[in-house]
Image (cartoon, grey):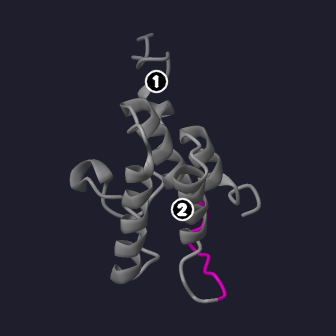
Amino acid sequence: MAKASTTKGGRTPSDKQPNRLTASSTARTGQPAVGLHYNEAEAKEIARQYRILLRAFKPALNKEEKRLVRAAFDWSVDAHRDMRRKSGEPYILHPIAVAQICIAEMGLGPTAAICALLHDVVED
C-alpha cells in the first residue's frame, strides 16, 4: 500500500480546507474575493474596507499574521454571504468596521482584528 504524501504539519493534500469563497482567487488578483452574492459596487466597497483594515495595522503585519487575518476575513465573508443589514448593505461590512475600530481607534493587534471579524460567525 502506498503511503499518502503529507504537507507541512503532517496533513495530506486532501485535508486542506478549500477556498471558502465563490469568486476568483485572491492569489490570482491580489484582491479579496468576496463572492458572487454581491453586486460589483458592493464587492468593491468590501475590498476597499478590507484594504483600509490592513493599512491600519501599525506596525504592518508579518506574513503569518496577514494570512490569519485573511483567513478570518474569508471565513466571515462566507458565513455572512446571504446576510444584509436593515439598511440593505452587506452584513460583512459590520465585522470589518468592528475590526477597524479595534485596530485604528483602540490600538489593538491582529488577534483582536481576527476576533472582531469572527464575532458574529458563531451566531450565523
- State the residue at coordinates (57%, 58%): 76
87 or 34, nearer to the observer: 87
Q: Find disc 2 in the rendering and name its residue.
A: 96
Helix, strand or loop at mark 1: loop
Residue 2 higher or lower than 35, as above or below: above
Left of 97 or right of it: where is 5?
left
29 or 105, nearer to the observer: 105
Q: Find disc 1 in the rendering and name its residue.
A: 12
Quarter assignment of residue 123 = bottom right
- State the residue at coordinates (61%, 80%): 84
- State the residue at coordinates (41%, 37%): 59
Could you say where residue 13 lies in the image, as x and y percent from the top left?
42, 29
Instruction: Locate the N terminus by quadrant.
Output: top left
Q: Is residue 64 magenta?
A: no
Residue 123 higher or lower than 10, as above or below: below
Kind of residue indicated by mark 2: Ile
Per the picture, the main secondary structure of the magenta-coloured stretch is loop
Highlighted range, magenta:
78-86
Kind of residue indicated by mark 1: Thr
Helix, strand or loop at mark 2: helix
